[in-house]
Image: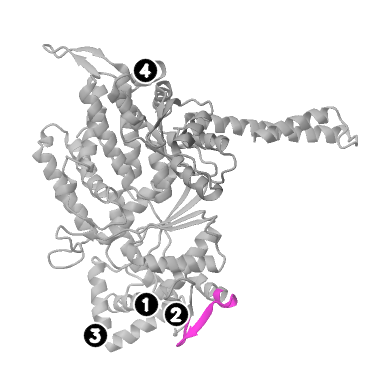
């Protein structure tokens, strides 16, 4: 943009002096050209100003900034090295500074391999430090041990970043390009109830969407419902028998799960019913209006049940079930045939994908389509119609081979290039009971999700009453605390575990207000929020102080907390790359415990011991409390947790 502005300005000057390409144009044409250039110039200058002001308000990813600085230093010290290793991490101990650059060891290896030069890492580290460009954030660097470069940040830099955070709020670092992200999550089956297995996909997917939205991406949240297929034949046949007037009177299907079981039992035991069920499938697939109406009725009953759960957990989704892709499937089969990828095996049309032993079946011997076909159609639509730059499938680990095969088939046929478009399977493990076996009811059934949420609400209320919160909170506040704790704890227990692992579902553990739990963090948050309130400092006073006060970070615990707060953007950046949300939970827990250390060692509000009257308010420390709270609030928001003011 800056270059284009320079060029446009020069062009406008040139037009002023006429002689455009050696031809003197008409005065009117010249004015027209001049006006267009000026308009373009104004537009560019304005958008550049907006970009700069947005960047000025954004939080700085300190780790990325240090990587830029050390990248430039390494480039200057070793201009001939291609892609030298760039390793910058936060220091684990204060004596080693605030961050460490550990690139010297890697460069030693490269010099030895490529140039057969034997140079000690310490010597390389010295050369790198001599070439560090002038910058706003490094106070000093020290070389330690074999060649670690310890980085000490400038206090005024950290202080300014904290002030900016307090004035501008939590603004993510600006994106170079606003990419489109398509997230496929939740995806239950019509006519079956959502069970505990759907819980993980729903919670993880929602949180990923919130993270990408906060980071500035354009996010499409898709619910790939199982709303098409042979099971609808038996459901419609059963509907016709039970509610023959379904076309004119809406059938009162209260319990869809029982309805499904009845139709399945008949399908398995009654030969005549089974035949009719197959006929119903054919009529449904040929779009017979009566059968389409029956199908829609069944889908609507399911939809209402799903929505109860989505409303409880504050989940937003765009429904796009398998039926959406039905019309596209014949074209998918044709495309694979035209490119010569299809083999016929016992009447089935199959596609072998290099690197995978099991082929995809894209058409059954009876001419029907499969999950493979609908998943390929969905992949193509998301890439070619939705123009997704990043596709994320939040689906259990058991589907891993299937999805990797589908993705590889998409690459093979030329729908996308993995160097340009990211297609990822965000896999997750199963939910286990406290006996470490698959989570089931006592009777051995799968746990219904709605029952689980209701149990969570009951347990949360019991916990609040045990703590005698019902005596100090109004009825409304108690209800808000109950839903905040119940659903917050269920979500956090899931998100705080590495999603790749199985996790044990335990209400006792998740409602414990000690350790890395939502109960502890929500309680810590309400305590932090109460500090300023109890000192009679309102939001306006805090805003005024943020603009006027310098955040003094002289005490080691103030310094530790200040740096911890500013690590937020680098935590989010890591998750955008590896899609592992437990890193955010670990960070919030670290932030809360670092805050407790600060609060125990640094008086924010000083009171008279006898009278309890406030003697002194240390405003810069209250601002540190506020900065902690706004980062925690944004972290909760990304995790889909709603904190409360009183608890």
Name the quadrant of the C terminus.
top left
Residue 603: tell me if it is visible: yes
- In whole angstroms, how far apart are the C-alphas of marks 4 and 2? 68 Å
Where 34 falls versus 445 (above or below)?
above
Q: Nearer the viewer, mark 4 or mark 2?
A: 4
Residue 368 marker = 2
Where 299 falls versus 580 (above or below)?
below
Q: Nearer the viewer, residue 60 or 71?
A: 71
Rate crowding at label 1 as few (under 14), some (14 to 19) or many (20 or more) other CA atoms within 10 Å.
Answer: some
Residue 545 marker = 4
Q: Quadrant of residue 189?
A: bottom left
Q: Is the C-beta separation of discs 3 and 2 under 8 Å?
A: no
Q: Is the C-beta separation of discs 2 and 1 under 8 Å?
A: yes
Q: Nearer the viewer, residue 483 or 13?
A: 13
Where 298 falls versus 140 (above or below)?
below
**In this figure, which residue is indicated by the disc labeled 3?**
269
Q: Please tell me whether mark 2 sits on a helix, a strand or a loop.
A: loop
The location of residue 160, given as percent across then percent down, is 43, 23
Q: Nearer the viewer, residue 588 or 150?
A: 150
**In this figure, which residue is indicated by the disc labeled 1?**
230
- In whole angstroms, how far apart are the C-alphas of marks 4 and 1? 66 Å
């Amino acid at each position: 943009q800056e270059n284009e502005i320079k060029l446009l300005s020069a062009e406008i000057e040139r037009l002023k002096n006429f002689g455009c390409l050696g031809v003197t144009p008409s005065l009117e044409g010249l004015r027209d050209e001049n006006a267009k250039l000026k308009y373009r110039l104004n537009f560019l200058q304005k958008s550049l100003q907006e970009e700069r002001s947005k960047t000025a308000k954004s939080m700085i990813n300190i780790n990325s900034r240090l990587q830029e600085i050390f990248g430039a230093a390494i480039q200057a010290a070793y201009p001939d090295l291609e892609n030298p290793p760039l390793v910058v991490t936060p220091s684990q101990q204060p004596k080693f500074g605030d961050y460490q650059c550990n690139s010297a060891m890697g460069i030693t290896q490269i010099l030895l391999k490529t140039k057969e030069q034997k140079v000690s890492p310490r010597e390389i580290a010295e050369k790198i430090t001599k070439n560090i460009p002038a910058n706003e954030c490094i106070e000093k660097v020290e070389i330690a041990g074999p060649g670690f470069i310890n980085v000490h940040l400038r206090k005024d830099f950290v202080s300014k970043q904290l002030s900016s955070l307090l004035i501008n709020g939590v603004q993510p670092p600006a994106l170079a390009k606003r990419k489109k992200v398509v997230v496929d999550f939740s995806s239950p089956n019509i006519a079956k109830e959502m069970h505990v297995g759907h819980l993980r996909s729903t919670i993880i997917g929602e949180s990923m969407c919130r993270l990408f939205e906060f980071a500035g991406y354009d996010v499409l949240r898709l619910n790939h419902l199982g709303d098409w297929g042979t099971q609808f034949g038996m459901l419609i046949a059963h509907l016709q028998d039970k509610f023959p007037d379904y076309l004119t009177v809406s059938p009162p299907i209260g319990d869809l799960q029982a309805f499904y079981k009845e139709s399945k039992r008949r399908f398995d035991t009654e030969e005549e019913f089974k035949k009719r069920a197959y006929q119903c499938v054919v009529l449904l697939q040929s779009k017979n209006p009566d059968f389409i109406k029956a199908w829609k009725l069944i889908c609507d009953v399911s939809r209402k049940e799903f929505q109860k759960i989505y409303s409880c957990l504050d989940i937003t989704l765009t429904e796009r079930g398998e039926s959406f892709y039905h019309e596209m499937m014949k074209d998918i089969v044709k495309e694979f045939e035209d490119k010569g990828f299809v083999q016929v095996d016992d009447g089935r049309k199959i596609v072998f994908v290099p690197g995978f032993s099991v082929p995809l079946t894209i058409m059954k011997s009876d001419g029907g389509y499969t999950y493979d076909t609908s998943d390929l159609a969905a992949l193509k639509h998301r890439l070619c119609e939705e123009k997704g730059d990043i596709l994320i499938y939040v689906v259990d680990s058991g589907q891993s081979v299937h999805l990797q095969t589908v993705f590889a088939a998409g690459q093979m046929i030329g729908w996308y290039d993995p160097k340009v478009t990211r297609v990822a399977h965000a896999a997750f493990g199963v939910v286990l009971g406290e006996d470490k076996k698959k989570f089931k009811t006592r009777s051995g059934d799968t746990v219904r999700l709605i029952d689980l949420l209701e149990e969570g609400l009951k347990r949360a209320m019991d916990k609040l009453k045990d703590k005698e919160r019902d005596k100090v909170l109004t009825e409304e506040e108690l209800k808000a605390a109950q839903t905040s704790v119940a659903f917050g704890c269920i979500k956090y227990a899931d998100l705080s575990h590495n999603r790749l692992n199985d996790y044990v579902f335990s209400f006792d553990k998740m409602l414990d207000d000690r350790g890395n739990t939502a109960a502890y963090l929500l309680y810590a948050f309400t305590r932090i929020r109460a500090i300023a309130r109890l000192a009679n400092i309102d939001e306006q006073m805090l805003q005024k102080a943020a603009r006027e006060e310098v955040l003094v970070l002289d005490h080691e615990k103030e310094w530790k907390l200040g740096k911890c707060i500013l690590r937020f953007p680098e935590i989010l950046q890591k998750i955008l790359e590896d899609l592992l949300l437990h890193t955010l939970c670990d960070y919030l827990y670290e932030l809360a415990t670092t805050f407790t250390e600060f609060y125990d060692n640094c008086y924010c509000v000083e009171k008279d011991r006898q009278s309890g009257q406030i003697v002194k308010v240390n405003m810069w420390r209250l601002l540190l409390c506020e900065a902690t709270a706004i980062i925690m609030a944004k972290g909760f928001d990304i995790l889909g947790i709603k904190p409360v003011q009183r608890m």
